[in-house]
């Protein structure tokens, strides 16, 4: 059985309130991907539609979206692992092609978070936790990550300034990304503005990514199809996926995410590569501390040493391991179901040398780290030029 | 004939500021809270202890469980003070959520507002106490050991 390659990538602009319906939003990412792959909808054997259903008013969006994209009567279905839905979609697309069932599969991620109000959205996000034993205490995503941040600070001496440096880096590259929702620079003074109370101590407003509307699309093909259709296919070298107890009481690690460590171990093993082989990475920086933990969970730094990477600017474009040089979730925004596909797109463009002002120097191997919930699901994907 | 409405055992709707669950096979947890006890579960077949309590054991697949009371102290693993809250919790602000480690199990909950922020430190000993919330709901809170 041959390899599996990515032959097309696309992404809508990530925006605060998309002026259209979910099918129209999905179309934006899809059109860019089919144009990139130079295929027509008829060439696509199946579609996987990825999003988090609690934001959708449409029940079972897969059929509605597939029809709008011209992907009917081919099989389509809906896939969810909250924020890592579209990375999980890539994993399933890989197995559908690897099994010989299909030759070309489309992974379409979308989220129109503005379908509901911000207050409703916070409440629904809180229900991504354990609704029986945690949500009755009034939980929110930032507060969970804040507990990880405090534990990391207490154990390793990481500071709020270290986390701020991650936000400043994100803003540096967000300014270069025309599809990002937040394109302004961010300064230390803004981050530590005493007029802005923390969201959940020790995390402040600038430690958190913003909700957004957006779509992404990845077109995946068998080796034979990829070679015949695409000049620069990017190959899926490693896939890792893991899960963890939803309730914090069921966990043992609070200074890193066990799902990221396990998914990374699997992906490195499958790819026959290690952290030192990675030339460019996209990590799930839904909060600044999430990027800090990702440095360590992925092996770019030893546990507790992530702060040295950002202090020394080693995760900038010219550094030892460039991370989130497209602005990350912190600048791009985080339309749940579309996020993983956007990260994959960035790494594919980097490996093809088509990342424009964000391009790192001649990368061979790239990595995508995409987390669902508060370390509930973890996907690590390793992609390569050859 | 019995009133049909009484056949629904929705005791769990009394748990926390806002409960999102009303029916659970560990509804007795609520009765114990009313009696002033915070209880975990222990599998009678293999002895595995669980907090939060479970009706079924994932270790040995037995559903024969017994209750045990959380006693003694746990160690503060981490905490965060929320300045914003989800819908339904605004009146509680600000409040701190936390995790305590009791060794054989951990527990997630809130820290008592009686404790000043500057006295909170990871690793400190705390205990878990049942409380009745201002809206009449039942919960538990972490206090100084």
Image (tube, helix red, strand yellow):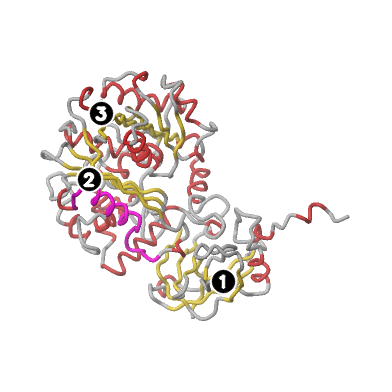
Q: Where, by quadrant of the figure, is residue A228 drawn?
A: top left
Q: Residues within 10 Å of mark 1 (few under 14, many from 20)?
A: some
Earlier along the polypeptide chain: callout 3 or callout 2?
3
Q: Residue at x 26, y 46 (%)?
A: A186
Q: Is residue A40 above or below residue B2?
A: above
Q: Which residue is mark 1?
A: B45
Tag 3 near tag 2, CB within 8 Å: no
Q: Which mark is residue A7?
A: 3
List the single residue furthest toward the right. Answer: B1
- Residue A242 position in % (x across, y down): 37, 52
Question: Viewer-nearest of labels 1 and 3?
Answer: 1
Relative to B127, residue B18 above or below:
above
Rendered image: mark on residue A229: none
Q: Chain of mark 2?
A: A
Q: Secondary structure at mark 3?
A: strand
Which of the image's four quarters has the N terminus of chain A?
A: top left
Q: Main secondary structure of the magenta part?
A: helix
- Residue ID for mark 2: A281
The segment highlighted magenta reads A252-274
Is A137 or A265 nearer to us in this picture?
A265
A267 part of magenta stretch:
yes
* Label 2, label 1: how far apart the Cα atoms are: 47 Å
Is disc 2 surrounded by few (<14), some (14 to 19) or many (20+) residues within 10 Å? many
Residue B48 % position (x, y): 51, 71
* Residue at horizontal 88 percent and vertical 55 percent from the top: B1
Q: Determine the secondary structure under disc 2.
A: strand
Is A94 within the magenta?
Answer: no
Alpha-carbon span between mark 1 and mark 3? 54 Å
């Amino acid at each position: 059985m041959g390899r599996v390659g990515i032959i097309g990538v696309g992404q809508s602009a990530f925006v605060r309130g998309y002026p259209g319906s979910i099918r129209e939003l999905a179309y934006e990412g899809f059109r860019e991907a089919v144009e990139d792959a130079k295929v027509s909808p008829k060439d696509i054997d199946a579609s996987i539609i990825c999003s988090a259903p609690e934001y959708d008013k449409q029940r079972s969006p897969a059929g509605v979206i597939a029809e709008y994209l011209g992907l009917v009567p081919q099989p389509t279905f809906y896939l969810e692992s909250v924020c890592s839905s579209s990375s999980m979609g890539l994993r399933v697309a890989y197995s559908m092609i690897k099994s010989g069932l299909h030759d070309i599969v489309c992974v379409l991620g979308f989220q129109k978070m503005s379908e509901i109000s911000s207050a409703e959205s916070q409440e629904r996000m809180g229900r991504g936790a354990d609704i029986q034993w945690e949500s009755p205490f009034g939980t929110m995503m930032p507060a969970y990550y804040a507990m990880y941040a405090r534990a990391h600070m207490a154990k390793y001496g990481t500071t709020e300034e270290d986390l701020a440096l991650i936000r400043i880096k994100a803003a540096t590259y967000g300014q270069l990304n025309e599809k990002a929702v937040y394109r302004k620079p961010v300064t230390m003074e803004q981050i530590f503005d005493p007029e802005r109370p923390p969201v959940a101590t020790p995390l402040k407003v600038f430690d958190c990514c913003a909700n957004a509307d957006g779509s992404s699309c990845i077109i995946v093909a068998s080796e034979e199809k990829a070679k015949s259709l695409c000049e620069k296919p990017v190959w899926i070298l490693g896939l890792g996926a893991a899960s963890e107890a939803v309730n914090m009481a069921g966990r043992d690690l609070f200074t890193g995410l066990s799902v990221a460590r396990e998914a990374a171990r699997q992906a490195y093993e499958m790819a026959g590569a290690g952290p030192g082989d990675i030339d460019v990475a996209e990590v799930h920086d839904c909060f600044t501390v999430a990027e800090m933990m990702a440095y360590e969970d992925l092996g770019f730094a030893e546990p507790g040493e992530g702060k040295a990477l950002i202090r020394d600017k080693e995760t900038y474009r010219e550094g030892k391991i460039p991370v989130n040089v497209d602005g990350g979730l912190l600048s791009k925004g985080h339309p749940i179901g579309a996020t993983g596909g956007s990260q994959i797109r960035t790494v594919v463009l980097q490996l093809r040398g088509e990342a424009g002002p964000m391009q790192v120097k001649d990368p061979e191997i790239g990595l995508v780290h995409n987390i669902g919930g508060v370390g509930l699901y973890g996907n690590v994907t390793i992609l390569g030029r050859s | 004939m019995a009133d049909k409405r009484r056949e629904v055992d929705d005791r769990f709707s009394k748990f926390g500021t806002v409960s999102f669950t009303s029916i659970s096979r560990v509804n007795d947890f609520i009765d114990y809270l009313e009696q002033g006890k915070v209880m975990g579960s222990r599998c009678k077949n293999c002895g595995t202890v669980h907090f939060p309590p479970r009706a079924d054991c994932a270790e040995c697949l037995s559903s024969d469980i017994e209750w045990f009371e959380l006693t003694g102290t746990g160690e503060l693993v981490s905490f965060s003070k929320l300045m914003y809250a989800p819908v339904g919790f605004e009146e509680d602000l600000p409040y701190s959520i936390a995790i305590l480690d009791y060794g054989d199990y951990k527990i997630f909950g809130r820290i008592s507002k009686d404790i000043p922020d500057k006295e909170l430190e990871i690793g400190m000993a705390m205990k878990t106490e049942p409380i009745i919330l201002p809206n009449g709901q039942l919960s538990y809170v972490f206090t100084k050991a």
